[in-house]
Image: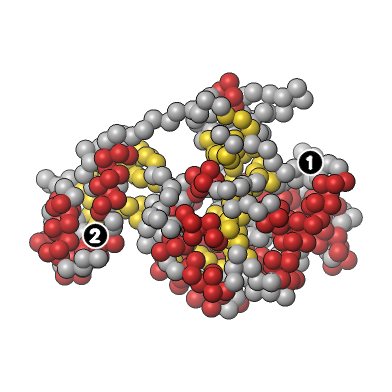
């Protein structure tokens, strides 16, 4: 990789992007070094190819001729043979945990900007009573699993150049939430420049390109480039539990799910939620040419997305929530001969510096293309892939925007409703409002319970709950 300025300038000129150094002579020495480092970190051969294809000649989405709903394992088995299979799968997942064969992997490259939060999204205070950060929720879940199964679970945290330093510092300031430091590995995903509709890379400032992460599919490339896969191999890891940073009640590792995945010899498997309505903003799990494939909600025609079965259920009801079990050897395979996932076009409004005036321009309409990869594009490349239905209330309380659906408020509401349901199932009375919602705010630490069954086992430790109480169980 070229590192000196003259060599980098030559590379940019060959890629027809020499304008990136337009303000170079005006920059201070540290600013020049920073811009040179940015340029050196980019694969300009890849960028040039993507500009030819994704920017200038994007391939339109074409619905495959034969799209079928993907089959899935139901959340709760309906007959005795399936119950036996699920019991065996849970035991298999627990055995993999005890043997130290499973790693946890969180994709955490984003900032909390949409939430009005200035730091990495994983540092956002997410729980209803103690306001624990998302990262703390995950570490406590993993520590509870380690204690239960007398094992070690390495935790891989993928950041981006935007938030890497702040993420590592946050963990240091919190003493890694009592997880041994050598059990956590931090690494960044690649960044790609935003490109104007004319094919020219945009500058965010005189000393910086407008950069963004290469999509959540880039996590599978980052595992390879960072050495995380090598580290996993040395630790004896065979399975990776993949999740994204925005869900405080996610099961970081679900023994039943990962056991089903392993017993079926699957390369990459997924959890799904039954869609509440046809155009709910979840990707659709489909079968295309016999392969599990995700088709975006916006790409599935209305006549298919609204299609119903005789019992009234949606025919295409399996929605993707970006929870996966992935065999380590499959990620190695995806990177064996160059990264295998395709890049997609995302049209955005990207602020940029006008080269003629040096002024910052805030565009009023789409002016740029970001190039992204999607992790679910690995599914059709898998030799085998299964889907398991999870419970929306038990495991899905995402925080994606400041208000409304998938906001901090809605996430805390789901968390409290789930916890109230668990407590009620254990025989402890929870006060209820006239609208049927809990008349208390309830938070349950992973050290107290990982599942509904754990609450039943610990019900004697639950104090009486009065209307309006804020209850924390640990």
Colour scheme in use: secondary structure
Horizontal placement of 8 versus 405: left or right?
A: left
Query: Which residue occupies the foreground of this view, 327 or 47?
Result: 327
> Height in image: 95 above or below 14?
below
Q: Secondary structure at mark 1?
A: loop
From this view, report whether residue 465 is shown above or below residue 228. Answer: above
Q: Residue at x 54, y 70 (%)?
A: 233
Disc with the residue nearer the chain's start (1 vs 2): 2
Please tell me in which quadrant of the rendered image residue 403 appears: top right
Q: Nearer the viewer, mark 1 or mark 2?
A: 2
In space, the residues marked 1 and 2 are separated at their CA atoms by 57 Å
Foreground pick, 361 / 337: 337
Q: For this view, does 423 lie left or right of residue 318?
A: right
Q: Residues within 10 Å of mark 2 (few under 14, many from 20)?
A: many
- Image point (27%, 45%), residue name: 49
Instruction: Determine which of the numbered discs, if any, sits on residue 39 in the image.
Output: 2
Marks 1 and 2 in Cβ contact (< 8 Å): no
- For the N terminus, the image quarter is bottom left
The residue under label 1 is 436
Residue 231 location in percent, x, y? 51, 72
Mark on residue 67?
none
Q: Position of residue 55 (x, y in %)?
A: 29, 38
> Is residue 407 in sight in this rendering?
no
> Where is residue 270 drawn, in percent x and y?
62, 48
Q: Residue at x 10, y 61 (%)?
A: 25
Q: Residues within 10 Å of mark 1 (few under 14, many from 20)?
A: few
């Amino acid at each position: 990789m070229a590192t000196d300025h003259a060599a980098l300038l030559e590379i940019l000129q060959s890629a027809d992007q020499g304008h990136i150094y337009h303000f170079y002579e005006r920059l201070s020495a540290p600013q020049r070094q920073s811009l040179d480092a940015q340029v050196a970190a980019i694969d300009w051969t890849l960028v040039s190819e993507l500009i030819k294809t994704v920017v200038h000649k994007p391939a339109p989405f074409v619905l495959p001729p034969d799209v079928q709903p993907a089959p899935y394992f139901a959340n709760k088995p309906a007959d005795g043979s399936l119950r036996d299979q699920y019991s065996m799968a849970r035991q298999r997942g627990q055995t993999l945990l005890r043997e130290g064969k499973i790693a946890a992997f969180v994709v955490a490259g984003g900032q909390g900007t949409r939430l009005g939060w200035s730091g990495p999204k994983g540092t956002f205070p997410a729980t209803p009573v103690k306001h624990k950060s998302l990262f703390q929720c995950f570490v406590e879940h993993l520590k509870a699993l380690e204690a239960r199964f007398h094992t070690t679970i390495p935790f891989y945290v993928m950041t981006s150049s935007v938030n890497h330093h702040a993420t590592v510092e946050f963990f240091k300031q919190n003493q890694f939430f009592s997880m041994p430091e050598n059990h956590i590995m931090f690494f960044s995903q690649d960044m790609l420049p935003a490109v104007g509709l004319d094919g020219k890379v945009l500058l965010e400032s005189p000393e910086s390109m407008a950069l963004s992460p290469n999509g959540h599919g880039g996590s599978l490339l980052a595992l390879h480039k960072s050495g995380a896969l090598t580290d996993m191999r040395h630790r004896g890891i065979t399975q990776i539990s993949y999740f994204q940073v925005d869900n405080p009640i996610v099961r970081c590792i679900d023994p039943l799910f990962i056991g089903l995945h392993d017993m079926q010899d699957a390369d990459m498997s997924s959890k799904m939620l039954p869609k509440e309505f046809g155009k709910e903003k979840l990707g659709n799990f489909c079968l295309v040419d016999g392969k599990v494939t995700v088709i975006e909600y916006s790409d599935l025609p209305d006549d298919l997305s609204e299609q119903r079965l005789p019992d009234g259920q949606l025919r295409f009801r399996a929605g993707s929530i970006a929870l996966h079990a992935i065999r380590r050897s499959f990620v190695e395979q995806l990177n064996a001969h160059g990264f295998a996932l395709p890049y997609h076009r995302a049209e955005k409004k990207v602020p940029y510096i006008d080269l003629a005036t040096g002024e910052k321009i805030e565009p009023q309409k789409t002016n740029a293309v970001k190039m992204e990869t999607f992790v679910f594009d690995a599914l059709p490349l898998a030799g085998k892939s299964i889907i398991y239905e999870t419970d929306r209330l038990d495991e899905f309380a995402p925080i994606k925007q400041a208000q409304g659906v998938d906001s901090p408020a809605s996430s805390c509401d789901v968390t409290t409703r789930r916890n109230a349901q668990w407590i009620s199932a254990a025989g402890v009375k929870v006060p209820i409002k006239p609208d049927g919602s809990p008349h208390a705010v309830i938070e349950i630490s992973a050290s107290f319970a990982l599942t509904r069954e754990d609450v039943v086992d610990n019900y004697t430790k639950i104090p009486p709950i009065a209307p309006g109480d804020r209850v924390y169980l640990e």
